[in-house]
Image (cartoon, rainbow, N blue to C red):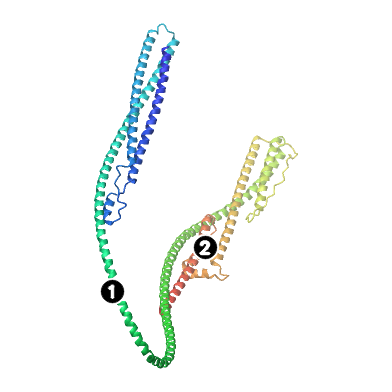
Amino acid sequence: MECNISFEEFQRLQEDLLRLRGDNYSLQEENRKILNELKTLKGSKENERINPLEALTPRKFSDFRRRFLKADDGESSPSDSSIKTVSTQEDSIQKQNESLQQELTLLTEINQNLQKQIEALTNQNASSEGGMSPVEIQMLSQDRVDFMVKIEDLRKVIDSLHLENSNLTSSLKASEEMRQQMQSDFERLQKSCQQMSNDKDIILLESNSSQSKCAVLESQISTLNERLEEQRQMGRAIVQKHKNEIQEVVEKSIQKQSELDEAVQNLQEKSNIIFDLENKLENLQVVYEDVQTQLEESQKREAEFNGICDKIRSELIEEHKTKVATMEQEAAVKLKEKETEIELVTAQLNEMESIIQNLRQELIDAAEDKKLEEKKGIAALRDLKRQLQAEKKRAEKLQERIKDLHDSSRGDESMSNDIDRYSMFSWSGMSENGQRTTSRPKSSISDTQEPLPLNSSPVPGDRGEGTIESICDRTELSQHVAMLEQENAILEEKVRHLEINAAATADELLRRGKLIQQYCMDGGRPPSKAVAVSHKENPVLDKLTEKMSGMFMRSNSTKNDDRVQQMLRLLEETLMKNVQLQEGIEKLVEETEKLKSLSKENISG
């Protein structure tokens, strides 16, 4: 029963906690709203200002208008309403805070009661552990752990509520400070309004004085109007008097009109004559003016044309000077570049010449070594030929002796068959080597060998009395003959390889010599302009080509083929570059001479 009650209380505590959280959130929202309203009120204070001097337009009241342009109205309704709303919200927040504190005290009391119940339950569990089953003890321990966890959660919630309460109190203090600030602003606005009312009274007094001055001025204006009316009447009388005088003068003029008519006729005649003269004079004047205007226009055009010509001449001279200067600079730069390229090419040629000299020395040494090797090979061939002939003779003698031994010894058929078979094999190898040496190209060996006819079957005859010593001698002789044949075949292969290599190197050197003659040493056809220029300008190249051609015509080695090919390619490239550089330098020199001549002509012109 106690466990059920504690669970219900726990649920109630959870509900209270949720309710407190909801109240806390609502309070936070209200606090935010209050702060937003305060901000809006501060902004509206700056916008909502009263200008009691807007109706007064004179300049002397502009100082008052500028002074009180930013003054606040103490009797404005928005500030009163905002202060009332702030005060009501503060009261509601205080009431909610008090209710929260009461609920927190209730929660603490409930928590204490729960702790007391838990202690009582623990005591009961301790007292009833002797008579309770282990399952019940385990269940009670689990319930205890659950209650402890829930109590810890409630404590955390209470701590969070305390923090929220402290935050709310701080927000209340801030709102109280804001309210006090607004109250001080309100008092300041009231003072400013009082001052403005005083200024308004002063302005009214000044306006009354100005109205009295206006009345005085109106009286003066009325007097001035009366004087003006009197002056008008006097003017009318004077005008009437002048009209009478004018009428008398008109009558006198009518009398004199007749006299004047006659004079007018005379004048008319004279005026006609004068008019004709004036027309002629006007025509002459027009002609003179036209001529004068044409003369002035021609003078202006001439002056403008001269000015344009001078400008164009000066601009052309300046442009020509700048072009000449830029072209001279470019030509100088190009000349420097070409000179540097020529220096680089000469340095490369010097390096190549040194490399070619080294290669030539190496080729000469290789040719001498090759000659020595050829001499040694020829001597070895002669020795081998002599040895071969001697061995052939010896083999013939041995064959005859073997035949004699076959005739004399019939009893040992197996040994004789082996010897015949061995001799057939050896002589067949010799015949194959002889055919190979005769079929190879450019060989110096022309001897052909034909194997002697041997019978594989023993010759019938009387069986001699052979001994073991004769059989051993025959086997030794056959082994010696086979070794000599093998050595002879090896030597023939070496000689054949040497001859093939010598022929290939000779062909390659001849081909390269022809290539060199085609590029730089061919005297049968006329040399091209570029090569002629390069030979004229660079005697080093002539020497280099002569040395290279002589070196390649004399050498018969194949050790440095790759290096020789590279050097030939480099030589060809350097020759072509030198020719191109020479042509570019000649073109630049011609352009500079043309520019100098043009500049001199322009300066003289």
Give the camera-side residue of 558 and 5: 5
Disc 1 and disc 2: Cα gap in Å?
Answer: 128 Å
Give the x, y percent position of residue 566.
Answer: 51, 57
Q: Is residue 50 left or right of residue 568?
A: left
Residue at the image position 56 percent from the left and 71 percent from the top: 526
Front: mark 1 or 2: 1
* Residue 254 versus residue 520 in the image, above or below: below
Residue 322 percent across, percent down from the top left? 41, 71
- Please state which of residues 498 and 379 is positioned toward the viewer in this rendering: 498
- Above-or-below relation of 288 to 86: below
Q: Which mark is residue 554?
A: none
Image spot of residue 259 (x, y percent) = 37, 92
The quadrant in which the N terminus is found is top left
Furthest toward the top, the residue is: 131
Amino acid type indicated by mark 1: Met
Describe the element under mark 1 as helix, strand or loop. Answer: helix
| Mark 1 surroundings within 10 Å by alpha-carbon count, few (fewer than 14), some (14 through 19), many (20 or more) | few
Q: Residue at x 28, y 49 (%)?
A: 68
Of residues 488 and 342, which is closer to you in this image? Answer: 342
Q: Which mark is residue 572?
A: 2
In this rendering, position of residue 180 left or right of residue 555 = left
Query: In the figure, residue 525 lies in which quadrant?
Result: bottom right
Quadrant position of the C terminus in the picture: bottom left
Whether residue 220 is visible to the viewer of this picture, yes or no, is yes
Would residue 605 be seen by someone viewing this image from the given angle? no
Which amino acid does the dot numbered 2 rest on? Glu
On residue 234, which mark appears?
1
